Image (tube, grey):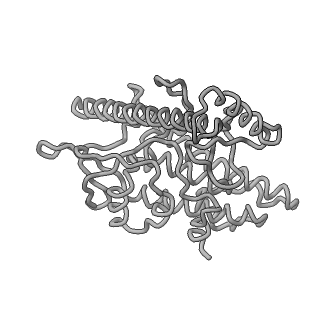
């Protein structure tokens, strides 16, 4: 079984959606020599529930890169082969190495195909190493060299097996953390009419790939927010639905579900109607309020994504034209 097919197992965590918000895909894309070329006009939104890790790992040819850019999203790689958020320019905007060209009346973006394929290969190597390390086996030195580059490994001469495995797991964790950092992945607070919510932000499809890669390496199915203590936790089974009350292990073992159920039952007594138990009626109210909050949060997040994307493109266009 290949690493790709092993990580395709839903119990292993790959391709799990995250509340990252939408990103953009190209309306059309073509390959010109070593560059992926697509127009900036007509970029369309891709929903955050779209699976991206497996298709990204399967990239092997330039034509597949162009297909991914149209169907799954554009990476936004600069001439360094890294996400444009990996560094900032003098004006505080994205990396100035992101290439644009004016062709007639249209503006097009150019991304290095070599960078796409290199990142896909590195992600596949990361998952291959994760399979070995999660099974308490040493990672293959050749795969380590391919994933990290031509460097010496601090664990190569370590005799103690437990220490050697820990050092390799630390190196793999640092590698995945670098992916998340380059894609500007992080938690943010977003305010709306319904309150303040925690969302995960990142640079487009790069952020989604980095998060799904992180979940796969850690053998986690994703992240959820405890309905009682509001802290993030990793579910032991499947991810809860957006409108479903869920609890972390500490709150669950501390009796939070029963306390919440009693409170819902108690507060629902004043609204008893024929044919409905108080608890069912109260739960319907809670679910309706939660759905409204999620819809409002998604609208706000989409608006923020559009504004930031247009702002970055405008700054980059002005800078290019100024040259």
Q: In this picture, is 270 found above or below 129?
A: above
Specify the farthest residue to the left: 104
Residue at the (40%, 34%) spot, across then down: 299
Image location of residue 25, percent across then percent down: 33, 50
Residue at the (43%, 55%) spot, across then down: 115
The answer to whether 272 appears left or right of 258 in the picture is: left
The answer to whether 177 appears left or right of 78 in the picture is: right
The answer to whether 278 appears left or right of 97 in the picture is: right
> Dividing the image into 4 quarters, which one contains the N terminus?
bottom right
Q: What is the count of numbered marks?
A: 0
Image location of residue 304, percent across then percent down: 39, 31
Specify the farthest residue to the bottom: 1
Image location of residue 105, percent across then percent down: 12, 42
Q: In this picture, is 113 found above or below 308?
A: below
Q: Nearer the viewer, residue 70 or 79?
A: 70
Q: Nearer the viewer, residue 13 or 64?
A: 13
Q: In this picture, is 278 found above or below 108?
A: above
> Dividing the image into 4 quarters, which one contains the C terminus?
top left
Q: Nearer the viewer, residue 28 or 273?
A: 273
Specify the farthest residue to the right: 160
Residue at the (53%, 47%) spot, across then down: 18
Image location of residue 192, percent across then percent down: 47, 25
Residue at the (62%, 48%) spot, across then down: 240
């Amino acid at each position: 079984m290949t690493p790709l097919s092993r990580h395709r197992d839903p119990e292993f965590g790959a391709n799990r959606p995250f509340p990252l918000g939408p990103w953009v895909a190209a309306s059309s894309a073509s390959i010109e020599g070593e560059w992926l070329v697509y127009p900036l006009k007509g970029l369309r939104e891709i929903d955050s529930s779209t699976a991206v890790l497996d298709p990204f790992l399967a990239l092997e040819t330039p034509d597949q890169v162009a297909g991914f850019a149209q169907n799954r999203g554009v990476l936004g790689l600069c001439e360094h082969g890294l996400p444009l958020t990996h560094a900032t320019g003098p004006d505080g905007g994205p990396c100035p190495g992101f290439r644009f060209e004016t062709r007639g009346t249209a503006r097009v973006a150019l991304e290095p195909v070599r960078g796409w394929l290199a990142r896909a290969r590195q992600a596949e190597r990361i998952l291959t190493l994760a399979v070995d390390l999660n099974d308490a086996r040493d990672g293959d030195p050749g795969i380590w060299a391919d994933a990290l580059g031509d460097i010496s490994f601090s664990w190569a001469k370590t005799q103690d097996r437990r220490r050697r495995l820990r050092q390799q797991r630390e190196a793999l964790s640092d590698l995945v953390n670098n992916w998340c950092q380059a894609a500007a992945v992080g938690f943010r607070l977003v305010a709306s009419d319904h309150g303040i919510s925690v969302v995960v932000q990142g640079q487009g499809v790069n952020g989604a790939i980095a998060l799904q890669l992180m979940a796969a390496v850690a053998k986690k199915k994703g992240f959820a927010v405890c309905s009682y203590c509001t802290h993030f936790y990793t579910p032991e089974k499947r991810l809860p639905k957006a409108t479903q009350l869920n609890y972390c292990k500490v709150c669950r073992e501390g009796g939070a579900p029963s306390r919440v159920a009693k409170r819902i039952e108690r507060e629902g007594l004043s609204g008893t109607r024929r044919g409905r138990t108080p608890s069912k009626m109260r739960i319907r109210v809670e679910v309706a309020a939660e759905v409204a909050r999620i819809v409002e949060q998604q609208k706000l997040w989409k608006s923020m994504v559009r504004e930031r994307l247009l702002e970055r493109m405008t700054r980059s266009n002005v800078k290019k034209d100024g040259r």
